[in-house]
Image (cartoon, helix red, strand yellow):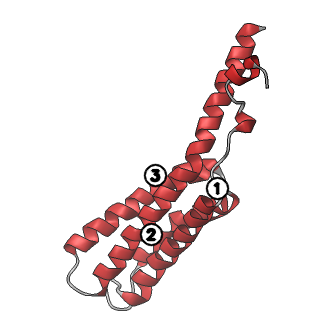
Amino acid sequence: MNDEQMNQPPSASQLVLAPPVFRYTALFSLICLFLLCIVWEVWLAPLKPGGTLLFLKALPLAFALRGVAKGSHYTLQWSSMLVLLYLMEGVVRVMSDPPGPSILMAWFEILFSSVFFLSAILYVKPAKKAAKLAAKLAKEQGTST
């Protein structure tokens, strides 16, 4: 490589994208959170004996499953914001529910939503950097011609 090639920034295609382990971790934790929301409110620790319609809180997570499984950055971005609502619910229920299995379920909700949030952010971050670099390079090439 000559000096001119060494001083140029890397192209977007030369950047290393996030390892797929973050996507798989996000998918696994999203599936676990989805199943937990249903099982928690129907069988394990429903608010009322016999279950309630609160299991429908899992429905928004179902919309994200396909996109997360495909590795869609857009889906991972909006679902990482959505999952913060489940994190908040878990924290509130840990602090307010009476002693019993519901508190354990809330701790699992906190765990799964936190793991999903972190793995989604770690998966999307390199792609965002690559997109910014590509835009910068395109702008520089457009002004230099």
Which of the two discs, 2 and 1, labels the residue nearer the N terminus? 1
Which of the two discs, 3 and 2, labels the residue nearer the N terminus? 3
Residue 121, position in %: x, y? 51, 51
Q: Amino acid at mark 3?
A: Met
Residue 64, position in %: x, y? 59, 60
Marks 3 and 2 close (CB-CB < 8 Å): no
Q: Name the element at disc 3.
A: helix
Marks 2 and 1 close (CB-CB < 8 Å): no
Write down the quadrant of residue 48 in the picture: bottom left
* Label disc, if present, on residue 81 of the rendered structure: 3
Q: Is residue 113 above or below residue 132?
A: below
| Picture residue at 61% right of the left edge, 60% below the top | 23
Cα distance in 3D space between marks 1 and 3: 21 Å
For label 1, the residue is 19
Tell me the crowding category of disc 1: few under 14, some 14 to 19, or many 20 or more residues within 10 angstroms, Cα based.
few
Q: Amino acid at mark 1?
A: Pro
Q: Name the element at disc 2.
A: helix
Residue 99, position in %: x, y? 21, 84
* Label disc, if present, on residue 122 of the rendered structure: none
Q: Amino acid at mark 2?
A: Phe
Left or right of 67, for residue 5 = right
The C terminus - image quarter? top right
| Picture residue at 33% right of the left edge, 69% below the top | 90
Q: Nearer the viewer, residue 106 or 124?
A: 124
Q: Is residue 119 above or below residue 10?
A: below
Write down the quadrant of residue 137 in the picture: top right
As drawn, which residue projects farthest toward the front?
Answer: 2
Q: Name the element at disc 1.
A: loop
For label 2, the residue is 112
Left or right of 80, for residue 127 = right
